[in-house]
Each structure stands twice: as C-alpha cells, then as structure tokens.
C-alpha cells in the first residue's frame, strides 16, 4: 500500500515541517534578525517597567508595527482570493481625518464608528468593482488609492488636524496590561479573524475562490460576495490602522499617513507564506512578516545606517528571507555542503 | 522480434516518502503499439513522466536504443525523439489552437513568425485527425474533447521515434477514437513505437500488440495482447478476481415504473450554443445524453446548472418554473453538476482531498455553519473507502493524486450532497475498470433512493448499462429518444446516422 | 491703456505638508488679489509631472510661469523651451542648478543652508557649545534635507563638543519623527541632550516621543527645528519646543511683483533671498496669533 | 478652455512626456504577460539617471558610453532577479521588491544629490526635434519610445520567444510539459524589463538633463497601471503591446488633461484622476462585455 510509512517517525515530521512549513521560515528570519541585533545593539532586548508598563525597543516594534500588522491581516484575506488592495494607505488617511475632525463634534464612539464605517464602505466599493464589475483588483483599488488620498486631504484642507481627545489619544498611546493598547487591538483583530476564518467555512471559501474561482463557483460558492466581504474587511482593518496612526501622533496628517504602506502590507503577507496567486493563507505568517519589516526598520535606526543607503541592507534581508523560504535553495545548499563534506 | 527502443528497469520514484513507483519497468519496441495498464494510481502517469524527464527517478535506469539516457526536461526528451501527450490535457488555455499545436516549432523567417504558414500547418495537423476547426480560437474556449484532439495533433506534429499517449481517448467518441487508432496503426507500420494508456479494455484489444501491467508502482508483467484474455488482464491489474458488470443492465431495465417528473425543460435554447430542446427527467430515473463530440451535451448540462444562461425556454422543477441563473441557485434547487473538465472546473488544486470533497456540501450550508470536523473526516474516510481512492490520507493535496483518483474525489463531492438531480458529464473519465463498476453501482443505489441522474458519456456501453432513457443529440439538437430495451449501442448509432440523410 | 489680464502658470510640487499648502494659498490669494488668471498644477511630488506641467503651460502660451522646483537639477531643457517662447520664469522657495542663469528671471527663496546654520548657532548658544544631538533628517535626497544638514554641520563645526550622535530620516513626517525618536531614545537613553529636526512636523513627533519616554522636551532635551508652522509656535508657547527657524512660505506677493516686473521688461536681481528668522519661546506668544498656517 | 490641448504640439508632447513611462511599460508588459511582476522599475530608472549623470559629469565619460553602461547594469540586475526567481522558485514580488530597494540604495551610494549634466551632446539630444508639420514635432525621447514600442510589438507578437512568454503566463506547468524553455524565457523577461527601465532612465536624463536618485518613487505603480489599463491581465497570458500603448497614452492623457485644466486644487486633482480612471475602466469593461456578447 501507499501508506506513508514515515508519518509516525518524529524525524520525518520535523523534516516535513522544514519542507512545507510556511510559518517556520519567517520565524527563522525574524529570529536571525533578533540575533543580529543582540550582537550589534545591546539595548535591543533591554526592557524595563516605566509608569507601570513595559518600555523598550521590542515594545516599540510591536507598537509601531501594529499598523502594518492590521493592514496585513486584511490584505491576507484579499490575497487569498487572488486579489490585492492598494487603497489601504488612503483609507487610513480617510479614517484618520474623519475621526480627527468629528471627535470634537460628536461623541467619541460615534466618531470612531463613522470613520470605520466609511473605510468599510470604501472597501465595499472596491469589492463591488472587483467582484461584480470584474475589474482587475490592482486597478480598481488604484483608483481609490489616488482618489481616497485626495478626499482625505479635501476633508482636512491640506492641514494637519490636531486634537487632544483623551479617549482617542488612548487608542494609539494608551497601555493595557503593561503593553501598548495597540497590541491588544492587533491581538483582538487577529484572534477574531482567525476564529472567523477557521471556525467557520469562510477560510475555506476564500481559499477555493483564490485557488480556482471557476470551480468554486461551480460548487455553489458566491465568489462575488466573498470578494466584496474581504475588501470590506480590509477596508475596516485599514480604518483601524488609520485610527491608530492618527491617534499615535495626536494629529491627522492626511497627506502622508499610510503612504506606501500597502507595499509593506503586501510584503508582510507574501513573506508570511501566502502566495500572491491566491489560495492557502496564513494570518499568523502575515503578522510575523509585518514584525519582520518593523524589526528591520528599527535595526537600521539602531545601527545608525545612513538613511539614504538603508535600502541596500533591506534588499539583502528581503532576498535572504526569500531564499530561506525556497525549498529548492535549501536543497541546493544542502547538496553543496554535502558534497564538500564528502570531498574533505 | 523487433529492437527495443525505450526501456526502463526497476524504476523507483517516491513523493514525500510515498512510493509511486517501486520497481516499475517497461520495454517498448520498434513498430509496436504497447498498452500500459493498471488501476488508478498504479503509477502509469508517473512512469511516463519519469521516461520523459518531468520527474527524476530515485533509482532505476532508462535506455533509449540501448544507450542510457536521463532526460532532465521534456525538451530534452523531445530532442531525443520522444513525443508525449500527458494525461491532464496540458495546453496553454490562453493561446490559440494553432499556437498550442506548434509552440516551440513555429515556422519562421529571420527569427520572425510566419503567421500564415503557422495557421496552415496547424490546420493540416488537425486535418490528419479529421478535424476542421478555427485554429485562431483560444484553447480555453474549446470543449474537453477538442482540447484532447489538439494535444494529440501537437504530439503527432513532432518528428519522433516514440509516441506516448496517456489516456488520449478518455473523452473522445467512437468516431474520433477510430480516427486516432487509424493514425496510430499507420505510424506503427512506419516503424514508430507507441505507448498507450487507457482504461477502456476494448480499445486495448483493438490496437495494441503488447500489454504491460503495473500494480502499486510495481511491474506485474508484460504480455502479448493476443495471449491475454480480458479477465486475466483485469485480474493482473487489480490483483484479484473481478465480476463483470453485465448484470446491472437487467436491474435497470426492470425497474422503470412511471414516476413523477422531477425536472423538465421546455424549448430551452441559447443562441449559438443550443437549439430548443425539451427533456424530462423523472424522480429516480437515469436519463442519458448520447451524441458525438460537439453535439451539445455539455451545453445542456451547463444551461441546467445556470452556468450558461439560456435566452429562451424554461426549466420546470417539480412542475414549477425555476429560474436558475447561477450555479448557486442550481444547487439551491437540489441540482449537482460534475463537470467533464476536472482541471479548470472541478479541482481546487491546493486544497486537500477532504476539503475538495466537502466543498459543495459546505457551500450549500453557507459560510457560517461549518460542517463539524468530525463529520468532514467521516465523509472523507467513507468515500475514500467506498470509491477506493488511492491517497496517502484525506489531508493530501488533491493535485498530488493520480487523474482517476482526482475524478473520484470530485464525484464524491457531488454524490455526498445527496442532490435531487445529479448531472454527470463524463463521470468515469479516466477511471479504471474496478472503480467504474463501483461508481455505476453507487449511481444505481442512489437512483433507487429516488435521485434523478442526467448521465453524459462518450462511452456508449456505459450509457447502455446505466440509463433507462436516452436522448440522442446531434448538431446541438435533440434528434431522438430511446427507452427500455431499445437502448442499445447500434440503435443509438442508427439514430445518429439516420439523421445524416 | 487697459492692461490685458495676465495668465500665469504655477507649477507646485504637491500638497505634502501644511507648509506647502500655505505657500500654495499665498500664491493663489495673491493672484486673486491682482486679478491674475492662475493656472495651478500639482505635481504630486514628481519632477516628471512638474516638467510636463511647465511644458503644458508653454504650449498654452501663458504670460509667465512660477515654479516651486521639486529638485535642483533637471530644469535646463524645459527652461530653454520657455526661453525660446519668451515666457519669463520665476522660481520660488528653492534654487536650481543651471549652466545659464538667463534661463529664469529670478529666484525668490529661502536659503536652506543658512537655515541649518542658524539652527546650529541658536542651539550652540543655548547649550553653551556642548550637546549630544539627534538629527532628524528629511526625505533622503530632498534639497531641504541635504542643505539643512549641511548648514547645521557647518554651524556646529566650531563647537567641538557638539556632536551629532545619531542622524536618521523621519521623512519630513510627524509619525516619522516620533518613530525614529522612540527608537533612538531606547538606544541612547539619557545621552541625548538636543534634537535638531529638518522640519517642525518631525520635531513635534519627536516631542511626543520624548514625553512618552518620561523626559521634558524643551527642558531636559533641547529641541530645534525649521519651518515655523503654527504647530511649532504652539509647542513653543507650551515650552516644549525651544526654537524654530522660520522658512517663510508666504511668497505670493514677492513672486507676483517679480512676474509683473519681468513682464514690463525690468531687470531683476537673479536671487532674492527671503530672510529667515529665528523664533524662540520668548517671542512665540506674540507671533502665534498672526500665524495663518 | 482646453485651448491648445489638441494641437499637434500637445500630441507630440504626449509621446515625449510619457516616453519613460511608455518604455518601461513595454518591458513590464512582457513581465506581466509571463505571469510575473517587476517592482524595481522606478528605482532602476533612478539609478540609471544618477549613474549616467555621474559618469558624464564627474568622470567625463562619453554620454553614449555612459548610457550603454547603464543599460548593461540595468539588464544585468534584471537578469539576476530573473535568475533568482527561476532558479530558486521565488515569488517575483519579493525578489523585485528587493531589487527595488537595492537599486534605490545604490543610486544614493553613487550620489546623494541630484546632478545636472552639462554636455554639448546632451544639449543636442534634448533640443533635437523631428518636425511633423505644423507645430508638431517629435523629440528624441518620443522617438526612442516609438522605436522601443515597435521592437516590443515585434518581440512580443512576432517571435517564438513572445509565444513562449504567453505560454509561460498562460500556464507554467503546461508550458514546462510542452517543452518551453522556462528558465531562459523567465530570465530574459526580467532582463528585458531591466533594460527597458534603464533605458527609461536614460531617456529621463535627456528629458531633464540631470540625474537624480529620488526619481521614480511610485513609478512602478504607474507603469503597472498603464499596462493593466491596456487590457493585460495581471494573472498573465493575456494582453498586447498595442493595448499597453493605449494604456500609457490614456494614463498620460488623464494626467496631462487635468494638469492642463489648471483650475483644480491638489485635492480635487486626485479625486478627478481617480474618477476619470474609473470612468475609463468602466467604459472599457462595457466595451469588452458587449463585444463578447456579440460573438
Ligand atoms: N507530485 C506528486 N506528489 C505526490 N504524490 C504523487 C505525485 N504524483 C503522483 N503521485 C502519487 O503517485 C501515485 C501514482 O500516480 P499516477 O498518476 O502515476 O497514477 P496513474 O497510474 O497514472 O493513475 P490514473 O489511472 O488515475 O491516471 C498516486 O498514488 C499519486 O497519488
Ligand atoms: N469533432 C468536432 N469537430 C468540430 N468541432 C467540434 C468537434 N467537437 C467539438 N467541437 C466544437 O467544440 C465546441 C464545444 O463542444 P461541446 O463540448 O459543447 O459539445 P458536447 O456535445 O458537450 O461535447 P462532448 O461530447 O465533449 O461533451 C463546439 O463549439 C463545437 O463546435
Ligand atoms: Mg494517470
Ligand atoms: Mg462535453
């Protein structure tokens, strides 16, 4: 029989983890980066308690990385369906602008609800264009990327809108259980998304639509609706990220907030093991990918790399992580070293 | 005896620890047609892929004309004189028929394509197979059968010493098959060595000179076709005795009391796709659709299932008019459709066997009510056993299964739904003898429980065995209907032929 | 004679900051005041777009063109085109490098290098020539970032005990300033005694980071920056920011004076430097009310 | 209102102004047709401009040689990315993102500031115009764009290589089984894109007479958008160079038309660009729908 005789062998299990595991390699990449920091910037792992909460570089990474993590969570679902969302940065700007403008005029809850609602509606528009209009995702969301930024700037008149609303400021600056409140938000969104995709059939539907849309439709899955849902959800995530970004600097900077963050989010998702072509996705992988980017950025600050040439080491890390993920590269290296050992 | 052209010995190939080939071998000689037989998952396609450089064998050797070769890619194999049609039609759906036939061998001057010559040569290649098509249309828009013919035309266009055909006839009708066999015989007589895989025993005996049988990746034996009786061949493939399927027919013929009509179409038509057609299917009835290629059988299935929306006529379900504008609505009406094109319309390649299997059922439950994992596992286990699906476990990716086993999973997907009407378009495409019998039995038992079946097949024997009524189609028109004892292969062929005059 | 209404094209970089918006508004308001038909183009930060816009203005046959160049080089070809069409060009807010300075009528700008130098001088005085400075740079490659860095470095050269211990880019953004400052504070902790930011937004971000690290910006750590936007004055009033070197965006009146003179064929000085002014906490209160941007 | 907009001069400008975009789009079309993506185009363009400017201005190299070297570097970088993508089966998105960072950083390593090129040959190139009658004329960038575009059509639609690219994008596994030389095709696609990006940079130096390491931020999105607007599917296998030309001109026109308007403020400009893009895409969608129905 063709039963996998090796399945019960722990060594084989470990091996198969190395061969297939999508989570393993981003984690290894992150660990290596941490190790590098441990050697070259001793303050990296320094943590202390200040005013009852943790304080240190690692905490910063979690806090500053929260925006990309949130975007990446939404983006993962979209990429799973074979799409992409370029508009997230602009949606962040819209959400931040609306909240900053309204928080003084209406109640805090209403302002938050309004801005998140708007971001979600914008996502729905993306979804309708893509799911029902059959427009290529990259173009459909590019439209909102350009126009959304304009809208956000129109709302704020090109000014930076500052505010001092305590509840709003808490979102991006507060602490909960000793950690930045943003960590709680990310954890909540992550857990919610994990539950929503894995404890229901939504995850399965996303993967089927992304892997073979025609076949999924033939099974009776409403692929168009699935798409509208994921773009809406990504819009919502972008809205939350926008609130965090705005709250964090106590100002709505609608012309700059979230600029180029869509690329970071896509990067995080792809590094996390979700292929851009759709299908299987890993939310945790994306979050790790986002942490990887933020760690990389902080590493550059810590090493004092001249900002204009910082992209070079960044490029090297990206390609290195990529190579680690490649099964072919690993076998190549193994055989290379294997041969050497035989030779000596 | 003629000289050996392509020989493989003791080939071993494992995928992630699972041995697909474990001592397989083959000896292909000059000027012969050689059938490679074995049940689904026996390793036929894998052996072919090893021979043609797609997979690298873990052990074993390949010789061509006495010299050891180890092709690293299909290109190298082609250069060495091996031309292949792989099992899953491997064409570029977005390119035209002409481009597909001549990809890599286009006529050119100064490195630039000669588009007129390209078209001419492609047309000529198809004409050899008796086909006249617009070679400018994209392959993706063609029916399965046409795609299969295009793949064959491509292989024939390559100047080769060895021709390998992996299930080339699985969705061809008899006329096309005869055409192909004619060409194969001619090539053999010219000295070519042809390796041929099929699950149709009749076809094996019709063309092959010798037969090699594989079982569980091992070489069972090599026989002269003339010396090997059918039952012995089946025995060699399955490794056990096998009862023929003839008795099914009796059961079918007797159990046809008049029952309530489940689904009815009234002059259903779509411009350019289907002429008005009226059909009715009773509860607990198997209605067959017979016809030659391009007669419009798939179109009827697609119109019923809301994939091609008809522009005239109506569909009535249990007497009430039904609007079916999407697959989802069709499923809601209790319909199920197992497509003939498993690669593009069936498989979700990167999902597991289990997930593929439960997908339709889950879709009908909606996204929120997840089928409990226990239930999923139970269903998967059940069908893996019932249909003898060869897979390491239910969590294996479906894309790693052999073609026939993939087909079984897709069938299980729809059978498990317990639909009121199941439309099966070439359901046994690529399925081995043993499993075919299992599936036919399953269809019968479901029918007995009151399910209706619309059965489309190019295998007339199969239609005769399974159907209680047969609608005969031609040129996108229904031209006749047979029932009960009238359902016989020659009767059906007569109806089609009569219409010719 | 009734003067024909002037049509003037204005090629702006973008709307990436409040400073930029103030500059745009100043020019627009001035145009309205003088009854000039203004054609405005926003290049969204890209020189390509800006060049295209200028060529568009030339094709339209405008009477004069005002350019706020996004970078210093790359203007020769299009300016030669303008010259051939006899359209005078007035440059605002930063200079350009061309081999032939007859290509433009005049330049009305601040001197970024001197801004950096002034910031350095003010800081040196404040800290008695002794400081460990964190520098928050603008976007890499941007002219103000390069020049303000250069000027500042020149300014602290005479003070051997003023050291830049870290210099990272905050991309001219408030969030960038905060993020970089947060990270550097973890590394240098109490070593940092001064912050120099290439614009106010980054300084305001850095101030937040300092506060969150339990420091008193303006007292524990001296913060200087450039631009002089309203937010900076507010921060100075609250004693969080120590000093800002004003880089005046209100160039409208000067620009249109120059346009009119150029149209009348008057000879203009090649360069009009808008004098920059240093503001510190002492004067902030008086100015803040009159700040429009 | 749009006086002078449709004059021959503006049409001439349309080609000249969009030359860099168009040239990069020709390469990108091949990449996208093959089922990949190249994010490095903007950075390679920027790198190529500083590279040329530094060689010409500071090292006194003959401009033609400098441009030739830049094209070689661009091609080599593209080929290297293609090699990684093909050899180790890496996602093109990540590899070219790496390429994007690398080229950007290397540009800054060469020169942190923008550099003007003062060279008689360059001046000639910038001022050289082929008159088309009336006020219309074609500049050197426009001519290079047209030439590259014609070569692009030839390579994409009239060579076996072009067919291989389509096959690769249509279905890589099938293409492999059909004997398409996957490796060389892929590497070549990225090499061509690298070449086109570097050439786009060279054209940019002619256009602006300078080199600048900050150029082309976000350029890759413009290029991809133009290609996709031209009807090329991002999933690969479907599209044409002619469509790309249309995409480039439409994208360029939308931008130019709105710039021409001169009345929109910065915010409305962005909204209007988005709106026009949407209107155009819906229109195109409508056209393809009706033509599909007619068939
Ligand atoms: N890429 C792969 N990864 C893992 N397992 C594989 C792969 N390809 C084939 N197999 C396994 O190898 C075995 C032999 O498959 P193969 O396709 O050769 O069967 P076959 O004889 O052609 O069957 P069929 O008649 O159904 O086409 C199967 O059990 C299949 O699951
Ligand atoms: N032998 C043939 N010769 C010419 N054209 C054909 C042939 N077979 C199919 N076609 C064309 O292919 C297209 C699709 O055929 P289609 O699959 O709808 O028919 P079908 O009866 O369902 O076929 P099948 O027997 O494969 O199920 C039609 O446009 C038809 O004209
Ligand atoms: Mg097979
Ligand atoms: Mg059919």
Image: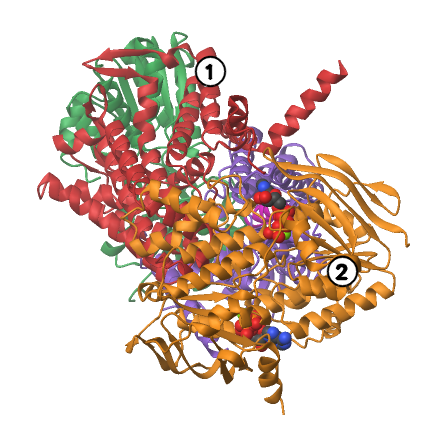
Chain colours: A red, B orange, C green, D purple
Q: Quadrant of residue C220?
A: top left
x then y, percent, for residue A82? 44, 50
* Quarter of the image that includes the N terminus of chain A: top right
Q: Is residue D28 left or right of residue B227?
A: left
- The secondary structure type at the circle numbered 2 is loop
x then y, percent, for residue C230? 21, 34
Q: Is residue B408 visible?
A: yes
Q: Is residue C7 visible?
A: no
Above or below for A49 versus A104: above
- The secondary structure type at the circle numbered 1 is helix
Q: Chain of mark 1?
A: A
Q: Quadrant of residue D61?
A: top right
Q: Is residue A302 magenta?
A: no
Residue A123 is marked as: none
- Seen at 78% across and 52% down, the residue is B223
Tell me which segment is drawn in magenta: D192-207
Q: Are marks 2 and 1 in contact (CB under 8 Å)?
A: no
Foreground residue, B264 or C191? B264
Instruction: Give the Cα distance between marks 2 and 1.
Output: 54 Å
Q: Residue furthest bottom?
A: B501
Identify residue for label 2. B105
- Seen at 76% across and 65% down, the residue is B207
**Mark 1 close to ligand 1, CB under 8 Å:** no
Residue A35 is marked as: 1
Foreground residue, B77 or A126? B77
Tell me which secondary structure the magenta stretch mostly adopts: helix
Q: Residues within 10 Å of mark 2 (few under 14, many from 20)?
A: few
- Seen at 36% across and 63% down, the residue is B449
Above or below for D43 versus A337: below
Q: Is residue B335 left or right of residue D11?
A: left
Q: Is residue D200 magenta?
A: yes
Foreground residue, B246 or B415? B246
């Amino acid at each position: 029989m063709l039963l996998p005789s090796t399945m019960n062998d722990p060594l084989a299990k470990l091996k198969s983890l190395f061969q297939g595991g999508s989570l393993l390699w981003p984690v290894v990449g992150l660990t290596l980066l941490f190790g590098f920091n441990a050697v070259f910037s001793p303050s990296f792992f320094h943590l202390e308690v200040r005013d009852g909460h943790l304080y240190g570089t690692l905490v910063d990474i979690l806090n500053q990385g929260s925006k990309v993590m949130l975007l990446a969570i939404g983006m993962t679902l979209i990429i799973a369906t074979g799409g992409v969302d370029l508009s997230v940065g602009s949606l962040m700007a819209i959400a931040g602008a609306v909240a900053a403008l309204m928080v003084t005029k209406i109640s805090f809850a209403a302002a938050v609800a309004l801005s998140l609602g708007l971001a979600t509606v914008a996502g729905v528009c993306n979804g309708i264009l893509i799911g029902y209009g059959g427009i290529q995702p990259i173009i459909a969301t590019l439209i909102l990327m350009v126009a959304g930024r304009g809208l956000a700037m129109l709302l704020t008149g090109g000014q930076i809108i500052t505010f001092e609303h305590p509840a709003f400021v808490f979102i991006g600056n507060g602490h909960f259980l000793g950690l930045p409140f943003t960590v709680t938000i990310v954890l909540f969104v992550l857990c919610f998304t994990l539950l929503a995709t894995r404890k229901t059939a939504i995850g399965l539907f996303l993967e089927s639509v992304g892997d073979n849309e025609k076949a999924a439709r033939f099974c009776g899955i409403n692929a168009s609706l699935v798409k509208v849902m994921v773009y809406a959800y990504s819009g919502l995530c972008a809205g939350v990220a926008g609130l965090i970004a705005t709250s964090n600097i106590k100002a709505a900077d609608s012309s700059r907030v979230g600029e180029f963050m869509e690329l970071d989010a896509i990067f995080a998702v792809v590094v996390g093991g979700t292929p851009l072509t759709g299908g299987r996705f890993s939310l945790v992988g994306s979050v790790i990918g986002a942490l990887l980017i933020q760690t990389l950025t902080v590493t550059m600050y810590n090493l004092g790399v001249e900002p204009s040439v910082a992209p070079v080491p960044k490029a090297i890390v990206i390609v290195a992580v990529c190579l680690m993920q490649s099964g072919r590269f690993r076998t190549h290296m193994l055989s290379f070293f294997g041969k050497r050992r035989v030779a000596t | 005896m003629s000289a050996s052209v392509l020989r493989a010995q003791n080939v071993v190939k494992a995928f992630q620890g699972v041995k697909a080939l474990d001592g397989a071998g083959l000896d292909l000689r000059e000027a012969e047609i050689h059938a490679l037989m074995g049940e689904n998952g026996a390793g036929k396609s894998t052996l072919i892929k090893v021979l043609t450089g797609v997979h690298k064998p873990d052990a074993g050797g390949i010789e061509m004309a006495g010299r050891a070769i180890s092709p690293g890619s299909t290109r190298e194999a082609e250069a060495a004189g091996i031309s292949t049609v792989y099992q899953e039609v491997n064409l570029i759906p977005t390119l035209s028929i002409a481009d597909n036939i001549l990809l890599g061998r286009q006529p050119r001057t100064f490195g630039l394509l000669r588009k007129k010559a390209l078209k001419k040569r492609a047309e000529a290649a198809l004409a050899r197979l008796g086909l006249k098509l617009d070679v400018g249309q994209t392959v993706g828009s063609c029916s399965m059968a046409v795609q299969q013919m295009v793949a064959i035309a491509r292989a024939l266009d390559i100047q080769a010493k060895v021709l390998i055909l992996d299930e080339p006839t699985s969705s061809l009708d008899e006329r096309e098959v005869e055409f192909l066999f004619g060409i194969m015989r001619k090539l053999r007589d010219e000295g070519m060595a042809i390796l041929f895989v099929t699950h149709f025993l009749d076809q094996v005996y019709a063309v092959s000179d010798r037969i090699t049988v594989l079982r569980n990746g091992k070489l069972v034996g090599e026989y002269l076709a003339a010396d090997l009786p059918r039952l012995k061949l089946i025995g060699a493939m399955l490794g056990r005795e096998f009862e023929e399927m003839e008795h099914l027919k009796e059961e079918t013929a007797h159990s046809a009391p008049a029952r309530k009509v489940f689904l009815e179409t009234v002059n259903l038509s779509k411009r350019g796709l289907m002429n008005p057609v009226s059909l009715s299917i009773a509860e607990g009835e198997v209605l067959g659709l017979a016809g030659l290629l391009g007669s419009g059988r798939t179109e009827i299935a697609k119109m019923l299932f809301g994939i091609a929306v008809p522009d005239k006529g109506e569909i009535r379900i249990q007497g009430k008019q039904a609007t079916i504008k999407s697959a989802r609505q069709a499923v809601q009406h209790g319909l199920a459709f197992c497509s003939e094109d498993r690669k593009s319309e069936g498989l979700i390649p990167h999902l597991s066997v289990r997930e593929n299997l439960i997908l339709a059922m889950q879709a009908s439950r909606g996204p929120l009510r997840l089928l409990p994992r226990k239930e999923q596992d139970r269903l998967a286990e059940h069908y893996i056993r019932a249909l003898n699906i060869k897979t390491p476990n239910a969590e294996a990716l479906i894309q790693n299964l052999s073609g026939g086993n993939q087909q079984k999973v897709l069938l299980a997907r729809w059978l498990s739904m317990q639909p009121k009407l199941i439309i099966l378009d070439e359901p046994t495409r690529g399925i081995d003898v043993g499993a075919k019998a299992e599936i036919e039995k399953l269809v019968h038992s479901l029918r007995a429980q009151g399910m209706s079946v619309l059965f489309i097949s190019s295998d007339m024997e199969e239609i005769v065995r399974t159907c209680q009524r047969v609608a005969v189609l031609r040129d996108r028109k229904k031209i006749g209907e047979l029932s009960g004892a009238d359902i016989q292969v020659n009767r059906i062929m007569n109806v089609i032929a009569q219409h010719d005059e | 004679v009734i003067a024909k209404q002037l049509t003037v094209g204005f090629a702006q970089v973008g709307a990436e900051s409040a400073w930029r918006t103030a500059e745009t508004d100043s020019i627009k308001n001035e145009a309205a005041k003088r009854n000039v038909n203004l054609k405005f183009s926003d290049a969204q930060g890209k020189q390509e777009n800006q060049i295209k816009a200028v060529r568009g203005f030339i094709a339209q046959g405008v009477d004069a063109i005002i350019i706020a160049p996004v970078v210093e080089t790359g203007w020769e070809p299009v300016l030669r085109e303008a010259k051939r069409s006899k359209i005078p060009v007035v440059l605002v807010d930063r200079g350009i490098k061309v081999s032939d300075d007859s290509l433009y009528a005049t330049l009305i700008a601040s001197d970024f290098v001197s801004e950096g130098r002034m910031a350095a001088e003010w800081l040196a005085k404040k800290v008695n020539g002794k400081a460990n400075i964190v520098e928050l740079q603008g976007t890499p490659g941007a002219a103000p970032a390069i020049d303000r860095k250069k000027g500042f470095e020149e300014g602290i050269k005479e003070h051997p005990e003023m050291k830049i211990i870290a210099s990272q880019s905050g991309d001219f953004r408030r969030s960038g300033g905060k993020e970089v400052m947060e990270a550097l504070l973890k590394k240098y902790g109490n070593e940092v005694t001064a912050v120099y930011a290439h614009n106010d937004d980054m300084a305001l971000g850095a101030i937040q980071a300092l506060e969150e690290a339990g420091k008193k910006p303006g007292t524990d750590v001296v913060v200087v920056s450039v631009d002089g936007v309203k937010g900076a004055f507010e921060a100075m009033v609250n004693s969080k920011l120590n000093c800002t070197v004003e880089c005046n965006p209100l160039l409208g009146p000067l620009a249109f004076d120059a346009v009119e003179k150029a149209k009348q064929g008057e000879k203009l000085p090649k360069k009009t430097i808008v004098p920059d002014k240093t503001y510190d906490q002492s004067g902030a209160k008086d100015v803040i009310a009159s700040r429009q941007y | 209102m749009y006086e002078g907009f449709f004059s021959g001069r503006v049409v001439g400008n349309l080609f000249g102004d969009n030359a860099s975009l168009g040239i990069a789009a020709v390469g990108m079309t091949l990449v996208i047709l093959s089922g990949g993506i190249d994010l490095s185009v903007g950075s390679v363009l920027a790198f190529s401009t500083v590279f040329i400017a530094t060689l010409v201005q500071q090292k006194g190299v003959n401009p033609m040689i400098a441009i030739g070297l830049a094209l070689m570097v661009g091609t080599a970088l593209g080929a290297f990315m293609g090699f990684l993508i093909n050899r180790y089966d890496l996602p093109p998105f990540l590899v070219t993102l790496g390429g994007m960072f690398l080229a950007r950083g290397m540009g800054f390593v060469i020169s942190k500031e923008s550099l003007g090129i003062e060279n008689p040959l360059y001046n000639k190139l910038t001022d050289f115009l082929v008159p088309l009658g009336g006020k219309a004329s074609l500049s050197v960038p426009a001519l290079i764009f047209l030439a590259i575009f014609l070569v692009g059509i030839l390579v994409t639609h009239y060579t076996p290589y072009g067919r291989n690219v389509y096959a690769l994008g249509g279905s890589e596994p099938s293409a492999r089984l059909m004997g398409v030389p996957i490796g060389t095709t892929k590497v070549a696609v990225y090499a061509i894109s690298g070449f086109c990006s570097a050439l786009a940079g060279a054209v940019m130096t002619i256009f602006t007479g300078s080199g600048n390491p900050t150029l082309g931020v976000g350029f890759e999105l413009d290029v991809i958008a133009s290609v996709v607007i031209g009807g090329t599917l991002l999933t690969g296998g479907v599209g044409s160079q002619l469509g790309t030309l249309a995409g480039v001109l439409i994208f360029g026109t939308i931008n130019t038309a709105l710039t021409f308007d001169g009345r929109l403020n910065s915010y409305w400009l962005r909204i209007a660009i988005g709106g026009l893009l949407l209107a155009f895409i819906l229109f195109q969608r409508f056209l393809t729908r009706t033509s599909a129905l007619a068939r």
